Amino acid sequence: MADGAGLPLVEPGLWVERIGARTFSAGRPALFLDRDGTINVDTDYPSDPAEIVLRPQMLPVIETANQAGSPVVIVTNQSGIARGYFGWEAFARVNGRVLDLLAEQNAFVDMVLACAYHEGGSGPLAIADHPMRKPNPGMLLEASRRLGLDLKRSLIVGDKRADMQAGQRAGLTRGWLVDGEASKEPGFEVLSLRDSGDRDGLLGAIEAIR
């Protein structure tokens, strides 16, 4: 496994990268997004930039957040690094490709956080239930600390229940589950993101928190 020298690693299993030069006033809500399976098609531990394909339904979502002045923050689990399938350098290449493809469509991300800790890993990354790994809220809390976010008004979109749980544990009140079922729990609502009508509802929610 590569050591990740020169990459934005704040600890062996945590990547925190500020993208671009947009500035935000304190107390802004953010749009949190999972990456694989949400922004791009999940190819099962993606490690080849040439295989990256965006999910086009997410482009207007990111663009709307950009126009609303809400930070767009990717929060992604990357257990493939802990398992030794690829290293941080491969992650950097794939993530760069995702960001480049988004930018070509006028959709921009402001911060990327990635957690490689997993109980099935080896060495310093072999940690079970690490606070930064979703469904734990660590990555969202770290982004909030760095960007001065209003988490209660922030929104999260992901393709797994762990994404929704991370949002709930971070203090958010709403999340959208890609191709999933809607549900309600005390203080948190999961909305389905399956079709254009669901997406319109998400766009309206992003515009309402500006």
Image (cartoon, rainbow, N blue to C red):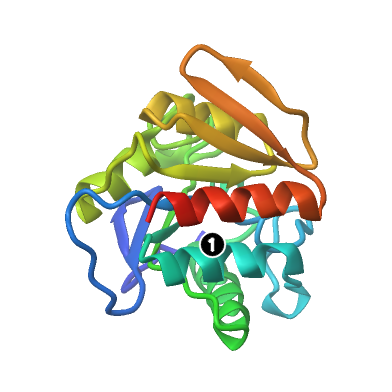
Res 162 quadrant in image: top right
x, y percentage for residue 94?
Answer: 60, 72
- Does the rendering let one see residue 76? no
**Quadrant in the rendering for residue 86:** bottom right
Residue 15 in the image: x percent, y percent? 38, 57
Q: Which residue is pictured at 23% across the width and 64% down the height? A: 24
At which x and y percent is residue 128? 48, 25
Q: Is residue 100 visible?
A: yes
Residue pictured at 62% horizontal, 29% vertical: 190
Answer above or below: position of 133 versus 31. above
**In the image shown, does 92 or 202 lie closer to the viewer?**
202
Q: Quadrant of residue 35?
A: bottom right
Report helix, strand or loop for mark 1. loop
Residue 42 as seen in the image, left or right of residue 77: right
Which percent across, then down, holds residue 51? 77, 74
Q: Residue furthest top?
A: 186
In the rendered structure, the answer to whether residue 82 lies left or right of residue 70 reads right
As drawn, which residue projects farthest toward the bottom?
104
Q: Above or below — where is 193 with respect to 68?
A: above
Residue at position x 39%, y 66% from top?
4
Residue at 38% in and 43% down: 139
The quadrant the C terminus occupies is: bottom left
> Considering depth in this image, is 1 or 135 the residue closer to the camera?
135
Label 1 packing within 10 angstroms: few (<14), some (14-19), many (20+): some
Q: Amino acid at mark 1?
A: Gly
Residue indicated by mark 1: 87
State the residue in front, 84 or 65. Answer: 65
- Give the mark count: 1
In the displayed structure image, the side of residue 150 where residue 189 appears, left or right: right
